[in-house]
Image: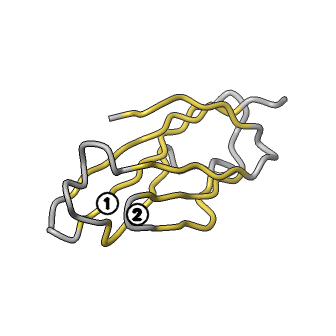
Amino acid sequence: MTVGIFLKDPAARLDYAVDWSINVLNGATIAASDWHVTPDEPGGVAVGSTVTAPTRTGATLDGGVPGHVYRIANRIVLTDGRADERALAVRIEVR
């Protein structure tokens, strides 16, 4: 599921977050979180630092090729063993 489309300058280093508390957790908390970028290409968007909290996850995104659109996926595993994934679409534009 893609949760939104965002614009990013290739020189910008920005934080993105996902709030998992609505209709996902049902009493559980986040035990693990992984971030993946598609396509994985030279000069493309890179995941920098990440944050995992009981109900939210976040990542800092760097770089990107102008004109390209990237799928930034966050997959979580909950303390009760369930798993889910959300994705952001990020379009790179020089601003």
* 40 to 47, vertically: above or below: above
Residue 64 is situated, as x and y percent measured from the top left of the image, at: 68, 44
Instruction: Classify residue 94 as left or right of residue 21.
Output: right
Viewport quadrant of the C terminus: top right
Q: How many marks?
A: 2
The label on residue 76 is: 1
Q: Is residue 41 above or below residue 60?
A: above
Q: Is residue 3 above or below residue 62?
A: above
Marks 1, 2: nearer the viewer: 1
Labels 1 & 2 near each other (Cβ < 8 A)? yes
Amino acid at circle 2:
Asp
The foreground one among 50 and 63 is 50
Q: Give the residue type at disc 1.
A: Ile
Q: Which of the 4 image quarters holds residue 10?
A: top right
Disc sitting over residue 36 in the figure: none
Q: In percent of the image, x 24 and y 55: which residue is there?
A: 25
Left or right: 63 as drawn, with respect to 18: right
* First along the sequence among labels 1 and 2: 2
Residue shown at 47%/45% (left/top)? Answer: 38
At a point 41% along the width and 41% down the height, the residue shown is 87
Residue 4 on image: x %, y %: 48, 30
Residue carrying label 2: 34
Near-viewer residue (61 or 45)? 61
Q: Where's residue 18, x and y in %? A: 46, 49
Please name the residue shown 38% across and 59% down the image.
Answer: 55
Secondary structure found at label 1: strand
Tell me how far mark 1 sits from mark 2, CA to CA.
6 Å
Q: Say which of 25 and 4 sits in front.
A: 25
